Image (cartoon, rainbow, N blue to C red):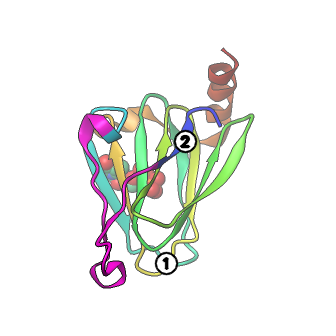
Amino acid sequence: MKNVRLMDFRYIQDPDDAEFYGGLVPIEGARDIPFEIKRIYTISGMQPGARRGYHSHRDLEQVLIALGGSIKILVKTPFEEEVITLDSPAKGLYIGPMIWREMFDFSPNSTLMVLASKYYNEGDYLREYEPYEREAREYFSK
Ligand code: TYD
């Protein structure tokens, strides 16, 4: 859907004993991430029934990565919606401007890492659905 896409990072494993040594995921600035990373934050300690997010950003790009466990993300506009499961550190979910998101179904001990294109700015948030929907209808109709 518009302004949302899944990204695959490399998952490097020891060919002789992948089970034992696990895997390594390299993520390189301008090469793997389509914006300059200004901020990184993590979300952890969620109980299974927790649901977070419920907002959109007017002018922010983010890549969400489940570092451990699995996490579901609802991404939504007035015209489209999708639920994406993040269950590998080698998977990234790119979310551009004006996408409503909700995070839920956190598995025990899951950790979400978010790479963001801008510093934290509360003024960029749309936290109520109705005003978001009005702005997003116009934004996606252009
Ligand atoms: P918020 O974005 O509302 O998280 P969620 O949508 O997942 O519930 O942020 C929760 C709180 O953390 C809010 O008080 C703002 C603060 N915060 C920062 O100080 N810096 C940040 O980079 C982020 C993302 C949030």
Marker disc for residue 47: 1
On the rendered structure, is 124 left or right of 23?
Answer: right
On the rendered structure, is 46 left or right of 37?
Answer: right
Q: Secondary structure beneath disc 1?
A: loop
Establish if 74 lies above or below 128.
below
Marker disc for residue 5: 2
C-alpha span from label 2 to label 1: 27 Å
Judging depth in this view, the residue of 100 and 8 nearest the camera is 8
- Crowding near pointer 2: few (<14 within 10 Å), some, many (20+)? few
* Residue projecting furthest to the right: 79
Judging depth in this view, the residue of 84 and 22 nearest the camera is 22
Which residues fall within the magenta stretch? 8-31
Q: Does the magenta stretch include residue 26?
A: yes
* Residue projecting furthest to the top: 142
On the rendered structure, is 63 left or right of 40?
Answer: right
Locate residue 47, reporting x and y percent.
49, 78
Establish if 92 lies above or below 61.
below
Evaluate whether residue 38 shows in this view. Answer: no
Judging depth in this view, the residue of 46 and 28 nearest the camera is 28
